[in-house]
Image (cartoon, rainbow, N blue to C red):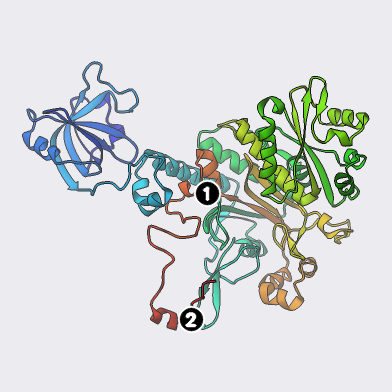
């Protein structure tokens, strides 16, 4: 149906007869001559329908409208002087139609294809139309290139691609499972995998040494701009390795992907401990494209005459008082704006937000009266304040202060417009805590199979369980967690001990993970790995505002597919086959 793609027709084809096909991007009637911009997968070429050259083709062109599907045969000629379009690859030529076939008509479009203001739900309802845009094609072209680059890089590093099951056993891995009822085993369920974690560890027991997979994963969790119920990750595992071996492979993989996609990035990435990341940036995924570090001032506030601050400061182990210096902040923000910042942090649980302004005659602000001159000078020196700066203070429980001051840091950077564009800043966050307490329960910060840091005898030793470190690492890109991994537990007794610390009994461990614990009895090698979120990677590479832009057929933030109307009710007969009954919930 074609001799050339639109992009392939150029000056070298002048005088030749070619056949092109595609969709009508636009049609212009100039009172006799009809011009049609015809677009295929990634380029536009101009078609000229002249009644003097071919009356039949011109008559058909009169009925052509936007998004009709055409097949056009004609002779290539140079555009007239001054009529070239430098914005198009085909801008120096046009095709004079000798034969025009309307292969298919189109209804009027429900929205303008390149209109960024169109409601996202409408775009998702007609996702197949949104995919026709050049922007969408470029995204998925780059995604394909990145995926191929990942496969080739891991193949060169002697990794073996293995597919693991999509329907498997429900196991507690953090998020909710998507459950799949079994027809043959009424009342029992499979689950869609949150990750291939257990199976890739079993592959290491099986002696595969180096495994990878471009894996589909499923998590029934609340959605955000960088989350979807189903997503794709580049999943990697390797045997007889330590943390440095795994990080080396990850850096080589990421560098190869970015290089093949036309980006220049460092071969080695900076590192920071989890503890330093939280203390300095209030986040375990800090954006390193700008500064704005937090400074600990709890010792200074302990000496102040304000009892609220001094009482908080008396418990430095569980509390924090952090200062955040904003260069030229006093010149940028009015007092009214500074007070509005307090409303912002209150949304995240803060009791308030203090601030000082650095003036020519010294530090000013409502809090200065609580400090001695010496302590005010200490604040100036520790925060490295200069005339025109503002400094903000957050005080309270350490996790709460980290959270809202970390969010405040990002908020300031955005409204001050100091985040560089077209820059990639990678960062390894290391030495994560093994556990965290949530609702009075101890849970694994990464997952239950992560290797804790042990003493020389391989024993877990700790005073405070939340201070116990793991051999785990996350890779962060521009403030977004791109992926992460860990060295895994490969000994049954250590795995059982971790389960017990999480409140998982031997019986529950056997029921949930018996197959893994049994496998450890047959010579499991030391192993570790990582996973990279492919969707997030492409989102960051393309500068997309949402992960939905880089997934061909995404779900909404309510986990619905507007295009196919999923999820949807099913026939009663299907439910009966699965031994299920739907119970309607009364609305509160």
In the picture, the disc for residue 438 is none
Name the one closer to the observer, 544 or 333: 333
Depth check, mark 2 against mark 1: the one in front is: 2
Q: Residues within 10 Å of mark 2 (few under 14, many from 20)?
A: some
Q: CA distance from mark 2 to mark 1?
A: 34 Å
Which residue reaches farthest top?
Answer: 81
Q: Quadrant of the C terminus?
A: bottom right
Residue 12 located left or right of residue 174: left
Is any part of residue 387 visible from this angle? yes
Q: Is residue 193 above or below residue 515?
A: above
Q: Position of residue 388 (x, y in %)?
A: 74, 23
Is any part of residue 283 visible from this angle? no
Residue at the image point whose x is 62% and y is 30% from the top: 418
Residue picked out by circle 1: 535
Q: Residues within 10 Å of mark 1 (few under 14, many from 20)?
A: many
Name the one closer to the observer, 464 or 509: 464
Q: Quadrant of the N terminus?
A: top left
Asked which secondary structure carries label 1, the reply is helix
Name the one closer to the observer, 94 or 219: 219
Q: Position of residue 19 (x, y in %)?
A: 20, 37
Residue 257 located left or right of residue 90: right
Badge 2 or badge 1: first in the primary sequence: 1
Residue 468 located left or right of residue 554: right
Q: Position of residue 458 (x, y in %)?
A: 85, 60
Residue at the image point whose x is 76% and y is 53% from the top: 471
Q: Position of residue 490 (x, y in %)?
A: 74, 63
Residue 375 located left or right of residue 240: right
Q: How many marks?
A: 2
Residue picked out by circle 2: 580
Asked which secondary structure carries label 2, the reply is loop
Q: Given contact means CB atoms under 8 Å apart, are the residues at marks 2 and 1 in contact?
A: no
């Amino acid at each position: 149906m074609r001799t050339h793609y639109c992009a392939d027709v150029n000056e070298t084809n002048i005088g030749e007869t070619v056949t092109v096909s595609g969709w009508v991007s636009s049609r212009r009637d100039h009172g006799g001559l009809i011009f049609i911009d015809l677009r295929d997968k990634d380029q536009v070429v101009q078609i000229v329908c002249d009644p003097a050259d071919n009356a039949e083709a011109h008559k058909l062109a009169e009925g052509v409208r936007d998004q009709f599907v055409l097949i056009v045969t004609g002779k290539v000629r140079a555009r007239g002087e001054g009529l070239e379009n430098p914005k198009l690859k085909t801008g120096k030529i046009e095709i004079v139609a000798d034969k025009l076939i309307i292969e298919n008509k189109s209804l009027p479009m429900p929205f303008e294809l390149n209109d960024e203001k169109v409601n996202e739900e409408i775009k998702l309802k007609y996702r197949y139309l949104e995919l026709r845009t050049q922007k969408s094609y470029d995204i998925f072209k780059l995604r394909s290139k990145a995926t191929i680059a990942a496969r080739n890089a891991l193949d060169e590093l002697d990794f073996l691609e293995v597919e693991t099951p999509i329907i498997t056993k429900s196991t507690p891995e953090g998020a909710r499972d998507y459950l799949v009822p079994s027809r043959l085993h009424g009342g029992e369920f499979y689950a869609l995998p949150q990750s291939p974690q257990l199976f890739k560890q079993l592959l290491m027991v099986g002696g595969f040494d180096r495994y990878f997979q471009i894996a589909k994963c499923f998590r029934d969790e609340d959605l955000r701009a960088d989350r979807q119920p189903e997503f794709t990750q580049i999943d990697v595992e390797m045997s007889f390795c330590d943390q440095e071996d795994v990080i080396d492979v990850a850096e080589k993989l990421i560098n190869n992907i970015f290089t093949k996609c036309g980006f220049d990035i460092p071969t080695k990435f900076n590192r920071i401990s989890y503890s330093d990341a939280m203390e300095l940036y209030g986040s375990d995924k800090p954006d390193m494209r700008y500064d704005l570090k937090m400074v600990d001032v709890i010792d200074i506030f302990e000496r102040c005459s304000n009892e609220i601050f001094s009482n908080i400061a008396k418990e430095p182990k569980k509390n924090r008082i952090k200062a955040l210096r904003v260069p030229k902040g006093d010149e940028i923000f009015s007092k009214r704006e500074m007070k509005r910042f307090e409303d912002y942090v209150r949304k995240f649980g803060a009791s308030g937000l203090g601030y000082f302004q650095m003036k020519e005659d010294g530090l000013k602000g409502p809090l200065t009266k609580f400090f001695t001159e010496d302590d005010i000078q200490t604040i100036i020196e520790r925060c490295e304040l200069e005339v025109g700066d503002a400094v903000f203070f957050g005080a309270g429980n350490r996790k709460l202060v980290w959270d809202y001051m970390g969010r405040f840091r990002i908020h300031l950077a955005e409204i001050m417009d100091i985040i560089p564009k077209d820059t990639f800043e990678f960062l390894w966050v290391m030495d994560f805590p093994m556990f965290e307490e949530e609702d009075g329960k101890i849970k694994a910060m990464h997952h239950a199979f992560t290797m804790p840091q042990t003493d020389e005898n391989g024993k877990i030793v700790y005073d405070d369980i939340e201070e116990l470190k793991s051999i785990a690492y996350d890779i962060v890109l521009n403030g977004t967690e791109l992926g992460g991994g860990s060295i895994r537990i490969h000994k049954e007794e250590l795995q059982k001990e971790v389960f017990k610390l999480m409140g998982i009994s031997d019986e529950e461990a056997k029921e949930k993970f018996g197959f893994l614990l049994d496998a450890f009895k047959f010579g499991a090698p030391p192993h570790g790995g990582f996973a990279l979120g492919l969707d997030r990677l492409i989102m960051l590479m393309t500068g997309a505002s949402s992960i939905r832009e880089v997934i061909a057929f995404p779900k909404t933030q309510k986990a619905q597919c507007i295009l196919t109307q999923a999820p949807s009710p099913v026939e009663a007969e299907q439910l009966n086959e699965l031994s299920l009954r739907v119970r309607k919930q009364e609305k509160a």
